[in-house]
Amino acid sequence: MTYTTSAKASLLVLSGLLLSACAHQPAPDAKNSIDQVSKPGVYEGYAEVLYDGHERTSLYAPVRDGTQLAVDIFRPTLNGEAATEKLPVVWMHTPYNRRTFMGKPAVENYPGYALQLVKYGYNVAIVDFRGLYASEGVNRGFNRGEWLPAARYDSYDITEWLAQQPYSDGNIGMWGCSATGGSQMQTLTTSPPSLKAIIPLSAEYDAYSFAVLGGVARERPIGPPGTPTGSAMVTARDKLAVPIDVDDDKSLLNAAVADHGLNVDTVGLVPFRDSQSEAVGLEWWSQSSPHTYSEAMKNSHIGVLAVANWDEAGTRHGTFLTFNNLNPDNTKLLVGPATHCDWRTVKKDTGFDLVTEELRFFDHWLKGVENGIMDEPPVTYYTYNQAPKSSWSQSDAWPLPNEDRQTYYLSVQNGLSQNKSAARSLQSTIVAPPKSETVTVFTPEDGVKFETRPLAADTEITGHPVLDLWIQTPAEDIDVTAILFDVAPDGSKQSHQFVGRLRASHRALGEAPYENLGLPWHSFTQADAKPLEPNTPARLQFEMLPMSHIFKAGHKIQIQFTLASGDEKTMGQPVQILTGGDHASSMNLPLIAQQ
């Protein structure tokens, strides 16, 4: 594999467009000798295999209010004997069962695959969330329950407990993806002194934007204690709970499970950013969002490797905000192909091994190995349709310093053009019947399409596309989902979750309380929500999820809109996408010049 570095470059005029030159340079290798190499995906001569096996023990660990959490510890062994020296510990805080994941041991099968670190001299641990599986206590919010007041410091306490164990050298890291990436972000907000590094995969930064993409809230059953919905979900998990080692008669497990009868599985419908959940009695999104604690995280001493996959939806967005809102001296960004948390596919398709990056990062932060990882450009990312040997690149910043933002106007001929005058005026409109149900970002539907002419040259889009859309409808509300496609000459299409979405009643723009990369930000509060004025032009400005993709010469860039009425009274009413004149709908794309 070859890696390249994006840096600032002088401007070049290409095809009449003012584009930045993409100054891709080979990434430097950190070398202490001819036998040592450390760069993204490659780590040779630094980490020696010291052990040939592991042993598992299971026990309860106490947190500050006396609640006992179930812990599995995996310690390295050599010739059947456990390691005698003190070693770092990397652990995962999980709502998904500490013992198994998808029918296999969680320690080796849950994304992050941390069991592979044991042979290099690491202890690994997994802990059940409070109120779930074998842990005592009450859980509210299931896989987001770590953000509730009683649980917010559980991971702080477990981190410090692990640091004091006889097998630990006091240096602690965390691993895991999705909800277990989110639990690392929660731990970051409390900054335990012994926590040196975290690797949150696919974790949110602004929880509302992640869970309610574009303000299109989902109805979720609350499932309170004693209801069929709540009891069924809790009982199903309790049946899979695994007792700790000394609990042969399951008396400890049964006592823990008895606590779970008070669990509240979901927080119900919380449609606005400032909505209060009736289920838990809290303003849910501010309570459970990492960005609420941004100052504490920014001042943290902890190393952060923020990771995402291009083919995931809402979880993708948070990683880029995390990178841009934390201490730049401590933080790195890694973005690969494939779907949510699927780093096995990344390895199979590209040869890039996530465990190699974990080892490089933890070696530096937990063992003090001078392997150069923090001297490299902080951003490593994959680009779709790049030549295989140069698909992975590095940059000093995100967005890329050499992005050149270009505006494409939606034209009345269903085209995309950089010529605004070609879009004509308001009199010519595109009319699309709305869908009868809310669409999801996961399933592209037929809708209104606008596309460029066949491209004269390869065109790279790397960054955050932004839509500036004018609509008009008799309906009081409408959900707009936009999907960007790469259309081949034979008409076949591909899209790697290049999506954006906005509910029209949430169109009001505000000032983000964090670094939002200059992108449109919506408050999503109840006070700012505003119905559409019937048959009156309304402006919707919203970003699409970030991407990195090369559209080959001869291909077309296509944007497709699917419209769903949010107002039952006006379901089926037409929606007009306006073009030209004072209501010129457009798409702004971050272009990167090709060498």
Image (cartoon, rainbow, N blue to C red):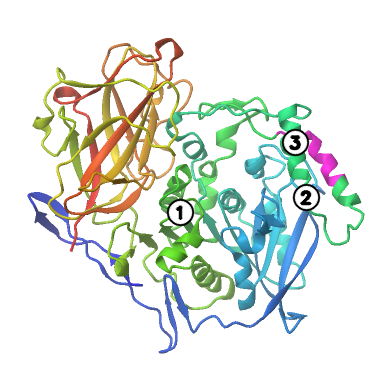
Name the secondary structure under disc 2.
loop
Name the secondary structure under disc 3.
loop
Horizontal side of residue 118 vs 247, given as left or right: left
Viewer-nearest residue: 87 or 160: 87
- How many callouts does the rendering have? 3
Q: CA distance from mark 3 to mark 1?
A: 31 Å
Residue marked by disc 3: 263
- Mark 2 or mark 3: whose residue is earlier in sequence: 2
Residue 271 placement (x, y as % from top left): 52, 26
Q: Relative to 190, say whether 565 is above or below.
A: above
Q: Relative to 33, say whether 188 is above or below.
A: above
Horizontal side of residue 346 vs 417, given as left or right: right
Q: Residue at x 15, y 54 (%)?
A: 457
Amino acid type of the residue tagged 1 in the rendering: Ala
Residue marked by disc 1: 308
- Quarter of the image where the N terminus is located: bottom left
Name the secondary structure under disc 1.
strand
Residue 497 placement (x, y as % from top left): 39, 44
